[in-house]
Image (cartoon, coloured by chain):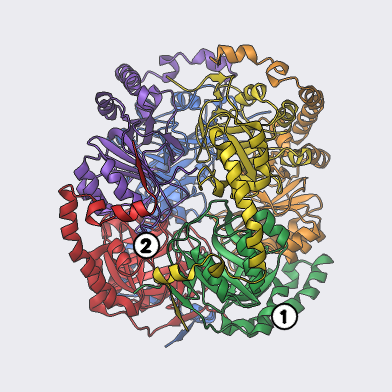
Chain colours: A red, B purple, C blue, D green, E yellow, F orange
Amino acid sequence: MTELGIVKRNITRADRAAVDQLAQYGVATVHEAMGRVGLMKPYMRPIYPGAQVSGTAVTVLLHPGDNWMMHVVAEQIQPGDIVVAAITAESTDGFFGDLLATSFMARGARALVIDAGVRDAKVLTEMGFPVWSKCVSAKGTVKATVGSVNIPIVCAGAAVQPGDAIVADDDGVLVVPAAWAQKTLDAAAAREANEGAKREKLASGVLGLDLYNMRETLAKAGLKYVD
Amino acid sequence: MTELGIVKRNITRADRAAVDQLAQYGVATVHEAMGRVGLMKPYMRPIYPGAQVSGTAVTVLLHPGDNWMMHVVAEQIQPGDIVVAAITAESTDGFFGDLLATSFMARGARALVIDAGVRDAKVLTEMGFPVWSKCVSAKGTVKATVGSVNIPIVCAGAAVQPGDAIVADDDGVLVVPAAWAQKTLDAAAAREANEGAKREKLASGVLGLDLYNMRETLAKAGLKYVD
Amino acid sequence: MTELGIVKRNITRADRAAVDQLAQYGVATVHEAMGRVGLMKPYMRPIYPGAQVSGTAVTVLLHPGDNWMMHVVAEQIQPGDIVVAAITAESTDGFFGDLLATSFMARGARALVIDAGVRDAKVLTEMGFPVWSKCVSAKGTVKATVGSVNIPIVCAGAAVQPGDAIVADDDGVLVVPAAWAQKTLDAAAAREANEGAKREKLASGVLGLDLYNMRETLAKAGLKYVD
Amino acid sequence: MTELGIVKRNITRADRAAVDQLAQYGVATVHEAMGRVGLMKPYMRPIYPGAQVSGTAVTVLLHPGDNWMMHVVAEQIQPGDIVVAAITAESTDGFFGDLLATSFMARGARALVIDAGVRDAKVLTEMGFPVWSKCVSAKGTVKATVGSVNIPIVCAGAAVQPGDAIVADDDGVLVVPAAWAQKTLDAAAAREANEGAKREKLASGVLGLDLYNMRETLAKAGLKYVD
Amino acid sequence: MTELGIVKRNITRADRAAVDQLAQYGVATVHEAMGRVGLMKPYMRPIYPGAQVSGTAVTVLLHPGDNWMMHVVAEQIQPGDIVVAAITAESTDGFFGDLLATSFMARGARALVIDAGVRDAKVLTEMGFPVWSKCVSAKGTVKATVGSVNIPIVCAGAAVQPGDAIVADDDGVLVVPAAWAQKTLDAAAAREANEGAKREKLASGVLGLDLYNMRETLAKAGLKYVD
Amino acid sequence: MTELGIVKRNITRADRAAVDQLAQYGVATVHEAMGRVGLMKPYMRPIYPGAQVSGTAVTVLLHPGDNWMMHVVAEQIQPGDIVVAAITAESTDGFFGDLLATSFMARGARALVIDAGVRDAKVLTEMGFPVWSKCVSAKGTVKATVGSVNIPIVCAGAAVQPGDAIVADDDGVLVVPAAWAQKTLDAAAAREANEGAKREKLASGVLGLDLYNMRETLAKAGLKYVD
């Protein structure tokens, strides 16, 4: 009756073309396009600034202090995947370092998202393998207890199904349900197209108050100006 | 009987010339010059390292998850201002991004200080608009409930009056009461002038114990040397 | 009956040659080599990325909000030392800045490790004096109450004896008991030598599952593959 | 494309008889029976000690600082339900007090589980309406933005489907998938039946080492006794 | 140019009769009556449940790890006062215990509110002297550095002027500006009077949706019911 | 070269008579008597209020998410001992429940101090077995990796040697080095004897300012009274 101890090999990944195009819009725009849901908690931070990626989720559930399943999930990675790792309880251990990153990259993984710690931060940065994690920690782990691969997980407050689209950048990590990938992409593109004109007007000194016609609604909501 | 729903248009800003010169001394020196009060909590961090600014505070009080008042405060910005934003309750949402930054810059704002989250961190960095915040988060906000602009607020543990001087750098954010701007500047300058000689002596190997004549007081306080 | 108020002048430092060679292997590798003990908590972060050092610990115990003993410990520094500072209670104050760093560098210190805050982060970065700390804070301190120098302390969850070897990099801070320095170095070197071949195999696409012969043990532990 | 703004009226609740019997075994036992998954984070605490309940989940997703949907979810409550509330972002506001509790009790709710704050803690205790929450806070909320009712949510790190069984006591809050209710109950009962004999033996001084035959495995795992 | 080192003897206290009547309404009701401002952060907790008090603030600003000013503030207490203590930086030390409580009670203090730790929790509970604090800690403090008494402070995120009204119960701590005491009292009384009828209706099964006529506004805001 | 995998059977316990008498003075008094060192972090809280104990430490170091060593340490318990448990990394799992408590009590243990979580809080309270812990959590653990028993550990920021005296009550947990037990007891008794007279004077309205002759030193330190 447990979800632990299972590796699901066949998962349905979100549409590759749609997923691949999500990265360019960034997490904030895609999150808005999707209706402001699906974000991981803001404690998830990139180990180095500037990376901006999208990919399909392969999921792994690990036991605190035990990274055995990292080797199991490696085999399930396909090019374009992002590994999303949850732990069955709060943990800050370093589950992942440069050797595993070498293996993940060889399999075609684009990034790791983990609700725990990673190590070899400097080498990972040099390798250009982006990781979003709760912390950096050298704390080593054992290989003693099995978890699961490609089951539904909760990572940093967000539900993730294997095959979902993941978008990650300096603003955080977003989960786009696989079935929403294309329409979310369309909505993000539309939103972005719309922002150029706004940006120009705001840059010229036009106020959002006027650009978005907020003055009347604000007054109705009770806003008062005093001197 | 509420403080919510008010925009104060006329505020008295701290002396511009004094405020503008505070930046060069940095937060740590000005904080010491001022008598070691007025600092925001150390969880307030710059979104990119190296920025060092001073300016006059325009304040805004927002509702959690609602950034409507950001557009209202934009209109009250004058060149040389720093927007200081507090939320009526703990919040990590992303209240501010590149579009609002474009607007704030067009109005002459030098920085944003916010006791919550911001987004578009990468673009803000490229734009060179410095932000000190509690966190970075893509979490979008609504525009539904009014707050206030240019009322006294508490931001990250520090009381801020509209018009106060704000100094911010990699060491954190400091609030200098408007009436103290000039004398704080003088004290900071005096302190800085005094540090060059000290630095040279310390660099040459002279100990602080001798430079500051601490040995006798330490002995009186009970310090004992053992082998 | 107190441990406060004592400066121990003569301490036995870990073997210099061994200590100096530890830095090259980095915290994660040395931590593994040592048997996965001795790490400080992961909230200890470098004020700038990329520094990688090893040295011998001189320890200092301070009172919250009081950095008087920083001047006392400066005198006990010998070239190759790393100052390790603990506070008698939780504190985020800025106990250390560029003047003290100038003094520490003049004495030959390689780094500071402090379970509290530091300030002048920007200048320390320019000086190239690495610090691992709980936070950055401009908050000034007084000089009123004595602590101790070169007594056993607990810093960020790790027990430190004066003279122990300290290794620190982007992955955190590690304490190697003085008596273990050489054998830990040997084990780290052996471990590192072993990793090159592994890295090549993993980079070529060989899985850890096969490289480490995990498939049978995983199956015995109950792991099941499903489609 | 949003999950916000939806109230699902017809949900399939876990088997009533099974759900009702889960409470007696308590969270720790049911969690073990279920395979050590499904627990909410340990920051979820009861507002008063001693309550021990089970029920079927009706879920609600709210906006930070906005408790409008609490009134919407009230209508969907059936006797034996437990309301499980998530917020779209971190929030500590007081979303729930004695008036809402009066309404929930009138509808037959057994408890509230909320990943945020509640207020009127004293009155709720007197009313005997148990709440598990992140904190207690008097902070009032607005009623301006819609959320959803009876959609899948993540609450305090656990995925919850409407209709799932919830078990809560002083040890925390557990989510049992609806389809697992009966078998989890059976496993919990079996586990409990088995514990009486163990407890007697341990009380008589028999060691777990012997009761569970651990000595040999420990020795194999490398445990050494020294004097 | 510092705010440290000052004891203000004459302060204007909020109207006694109004202040004394605030307690009966409790923090949540008074906070609503006041317009949802003035609350301290929810980490401020009572050391024992059930206390519900109101009083006039005498303020004290202390240095971390130093409780000297607690003895200074004792002299400024008048019957009906509540001492509100802030620290110049984050601190969890135990600034207050049973001896100081004895002195405070002899002076007529009704409670202590402190953004730090207290000790002798068990004895304080037996004495019936209520304290709202950030934590309980036995950590002793020194008496070496002066702070101030009866200056404006920020305590747990709320600005407090000497003489303001303080209301505290199991839901937290509220600051009512002195000038607002009577009108806040009136508004709280009106609110309370209004709640009895609501409670009865809700208890009879009437929904808030109908009692507050929310259905139409919810529909306008986009809420949709699905089966 | 690891500290893991060792059980030390023969340890020297602090003088039984001295240890047993420490409890009556409580943590705050003994901590002062000892010179204000040795306290664990204030996040260590009792699972129920009112317990006040002292005993001799048997120590155990566990792996995150793995309580195997709890059974090993049980055998090393002698009447009058308190088990002090540290984890090699941050963990909130529930390492201990009613069955282990039954075993510990049968062996004569007086309490458990653990820098992690415990479960069965309600039953432990009914059994009257006091526990000081970081949290309460039902999260189950595995039995797969060995740790050590009766080695020096760091628990919640305090260094603990096997055999040290432990004092715990509602104010927290204190470690008294075994060699200091008797003199600490004497100092605590002296301190307590001295407090009765002080308490009476303070209760009669005498101020600490006068009782401790602070007025002159305060004035010298710069304290100024203003109206």
Q: Which dot, 1 or 2, sits closer to the camera?
A: 1
Task: State the image coordinates of residue E171 (x, y, percent, origin top left).
Answer: 62, 50
Toward the viewer: F172 or D79?
D79
Residue at left 31%, top 52%?
B96
Toward the viewer: B73 or C206?
B73
Disc 1: CA contacts within 10 A as few (<14), some (14-19) or many (>=20): some
Q: Check residue C194 in the rendering and tell me which mark sits there, or answer none.
A: 2
Secondary structure, mark 1, is: helix
Question: As shown in the figure, which amino acid type bears the numbered disc 1?
Answer: Ala
Q: Is residue E182 left or right of residue A56?
A: right
Compared with D181, A65 (above or below) is above
Toward the viewer: F80 or C197?
F80
Residue at left 30%, top 74%?
A107
Q: Is residue F58 left or right of residue B69?
A: right
Secondary structure, mark 2, is: helix
Task: State the image coordinates of residue E78 (x, y, percent, origin top left).
Answer: 68, 25
Question: As shown in the figure, which amino acid type bears the numbered disc 2?
Answer: Asn
Tell me, yes or no, whether dots 1 and 2 are on the same chain.
Answer: no
Residue F170 in view, yes or no: yes
Task: State which quarter of the image contains the N terminus of chain D.
Answer: bottom left
Residue D4 in view, yes or no: no
Task: State the image coordinates of residue B172 (x, y, percent, origin top left).
Answer: 37, 37
Q: Is residue E143 left or right of residue E37?
A: right
Toward the viewer: F44 or A24?
A24
Q: Which residue is mark 1?
A: D189
Compared with A182, F25 (above or below) is above
> Disc 1: which chain?
D
Compared with E74, A29 (above or below) is below
> Disc 2: which chain?
C
Q: Is residue F123 left or right of residue A203?
A: right
Report the number of discs. Answer: 2
